[in-house]
Amino acid sequence: MRPGTTLVEVLLVVALVAATTGLAVPAIVRLRDRVSVRLAATDVASAIADARRAAFTAARRTAVRIDPAHAAVAIHAGPDTLRTLTLAGYGVRIRATRDSIAFGPHGLGWGAATTTITLERGAARAALAVSR
């Protein structure tokens, strides 16, 4: 008699693999969402820091405009666009309590610069608080 596997044994292995995969996939999706939100939050914080630095370096007002419809953040100094950050690659949604943040020539918040920016993907969420 030849050694081999029975149909029952093969079905049991397939069932175990399916059960393990069924448990692992949701955890992987949640992890991907958390990583995407964290990376997007880091990029947005970097863009805000760049805007502040540009305002101080050039000694002129600089604005960070938040566009939730296109999931984008743009840095403007007068009529010039210094940088545009698109968050679509991360698959996140962006919301903010204000549509823009401004920095004066000394790198300090200009006007009503206090805002909260929220980034979301799935159940993952991160909030950035920008204070004047």
Image (spheres, helix red, strand yellow):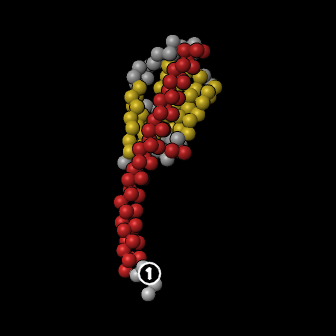
Residue 95 shown left or right of residue 55 in the figure: left
Q: Is residue 126 above or below residue 18?
A: above
Instruction: Tell me what residue is drawn at x 59 percent, y 22 percent.
Output: 77
Instruction: Tell me what residue is drawn at x 54 percent, y 23 percent.
Output: 51
Horizontal and vertical percent position of residue 41 = 45, 35
On the question of residue 68 being in view, the answer is: yes
Q: Residue furthest right?
A: 80
Horizontal and vertical percent position of residue 11 = 39, 76
Residue 81 shown left or right of residue 113 in the figure: right
Given residues 61 and 86, the one toward you in this image is: 86
Callout count: 1
Q: Residue furthest front?
A: 1
Instruction: Tell me what residue is drawn at x 64 percent, y 26 percent.
Output: 80
Few, some or many residues within 10 Å of mark 1 (<14, 14–19, 20+): few
* Rendering quarter of residue 10: bottom left
In the picture, which quadrant includes the N terminus?
Answer: bottom left
Given residues 86 and 102, the one toward you in this image is: 86
Q: Is residue 14 above or below residue 67?
A: below
Horizontal and vertical percent position of residue 107 = 50, 15
SS for callout 1:
loop
Residue pointed to by mark 1: 3
In the picture, which quadrant includes the C terminus?
Answer: top left
Looking at the rendered structure, the kind of residue marked 1 is Pro
